Amino acid sequence: MKKGDCIELFIDGTAFKGKGVGRFEERAVFVKGAMPGDRVSARIIKKKKNFLEAKLLEILSPSSDRISPLCSHAGVCGGCSWQHVPYPKQLEFKRQQVEDHITRIGKCSTPVDDIIGCPTPLYYRNKMEYSFSPRRWLTEQEIRSEEFVDDAGFAAGLHAPGRFDKILDLKECHLQHPISYQILDHVRRFALERDIPAYDTFNKEGFFRHLVIRKSHYTNDLMVVLVSYYEDMNLINTLLESLKQSFPEITTFIYSINDTPSPTAYGRIEHVLLGPGYIRDSIGEFTFNIHPKAFFQTNTQQAEALYEVALKFANLQPDDLVYDLYCGVGTLSLYLSKVATKVVGIELVEEAIENAKKNAQENEINHAYFVKGDMKDTFNETLIAEYGVPTVLVTDPPRAGMHPDVVQQLLDLKTPRIVYVSCDSSTMARDIEKLSSLYKVDAIQPVDMFPQTYHIETVALLTLK
Ligand SMILES: C[S@@+](CC[C@H](N)C(=O)[O-])C[C@H]1O[C@@H](n2cnc3c(N)ncnc32)[C@H](O)[C@@H]1O
């Protein structure tokens, strides 16, 4: 069997990035778009010693669990990859995925609790980052079509999976409140009517780059951030006027210019053209200011469920000194401050730290302290000498997990309890394995923050042996 061969196989599990997994001639085969119970034909696209990767060609006999996706872009768009999977099954697969990582990578036998599902599996996101491109992503159907299909022009939507240059021209999206897609459509029509080009990553020309929409869950705040390659204030003022007319719900509009090749959805220069330049949203009893650059849990409602688990695992006593590593705008820190005597949050992004300090002040919390810095350099003896030795540690790193120096610092510190919050259970399992010489894992609780996608949030409680 070699690359390019077509095979038939039965899918009996799910794996990394939500791919279906089956076996062919004793080897695991990963097939994107397939789900357990499907019998499929697929073409081998990668051949490794222990596994194969194959491209789904046809579902020969569908799983009895398959459902019709709600969205016409399902299967093509990188936003939702599991719309064909009923929600209870998504939860089952996610829990299994955490268990696989914990046992295989973490070498840990602690049982994984049933995942906490999201009460609203659609329209749950508070933030969408759309992009513009002159290169439209073509669907398989369009490519196979006999007729000429033009991929040039103006595409507004989400990146095609794994592509930095091609954009899927969205006609609908069910992850955020419908107004989000309507605003995107408005900007697309505005650009097309005036023939204003999208930014071209290869030729470094064109105007429209990104549109970021943040909609608060608990307040009526609605933020629109428009990012262009060069500044054209007249044009943007015209766009803003038309947006205000069609969407009086917009409470703040930020115009940002990214004149660098960097694809970040936030520019170097910022003009707040409407409202305060941030939105406010709540988690539990706390209300937060959210700056466009700052991280905020994208599923506000489930963030509360997640923080409740973290708080329960932390089992805080009034005299506890808690460190909240990778604290963002201090949301979890404030949550923990309900019980702890002192909370110290550490975070890389300057604006997030400024927001965190302001958030503490506005929520009348005066025993939370925030420090800006890269964790591996900042979380050290000098900092601990200044703020005190932690009795409980909460860590919520980005997907890559913790830097080895940070893990070493945890091993040196020997804090009695560590609550590890993670959006990638494979890197969490890797870090748990490194900590296992001193720590045992008492509980593992997955929480579904991202329905319709394969992403999973997990909280683990580690206690010093
Ligand atoms: C998953 S978020 C967690 C935020 C927060 N705990 C919350 O619930 O909103 C990870 C945070 O880590 C920050 N971060 C990423 N790399 C970092 C580093 N090297 N040092 C410190 N913070 C970092 C990011 O800016 C982001 O705010």
Image (tube, rainbow, N blue to C red):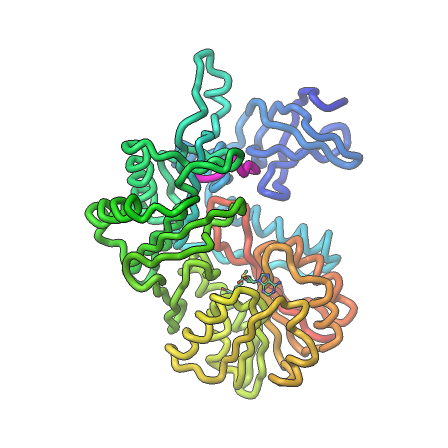
- Determine if residue 463 is in view: yes
Depth order, front residue of 267/343 = 267
- Asked whether, in this view, residue 374 is left or right of residue 310, the answer is right
The quarter of the picture where the N terminus appears is top right
Give x and y (percent) for residue 389. 65, 83
- Residue at screen point 67% across, 52% down: 101
- Residue at screen point 46% across, 11% down: 146
- Determine if residue 85 is in view: no
Give x and y (percent) for residue 367. 49, 84
- Residue at screen point 47% across, 44% down: 452
Residue furthest bottom in the image: 319
- Residue at screen point 62% across, 58% down: 112
> Up-down: is 6 above or below 26?
above
The quarter of the picture where the C terminus appears is bottom right
| Span highlighted in magenta in the image | 157-165
> Magenta: predominant secondary structure element?
loop
Give x and y (percent) for residue 329. 47, 68
Depth order, front residue of 232/177 = 232
For ligand 1, which image quadrant applies? bottom right
- Asked whether, in this view, residue 418 is left or right of residue 312, the answer is right
Depth order, front residue of 192/52 = 192
> Up-down: is 162 above or below 272?
above
Q: Does the magenta stretch include residue 161?
A: yes
Give x and y (percent) for residue 302. 44, 60
Residue 134: quarter of image? top left
- Asked whether, in this view, residue 51 is left or right of residue 364, the answer is right
Residue 344: quarter of image? bottom right
> Up-down: is 26 above or below 17?
above
Q: Is residue 10 magenta?
A: no
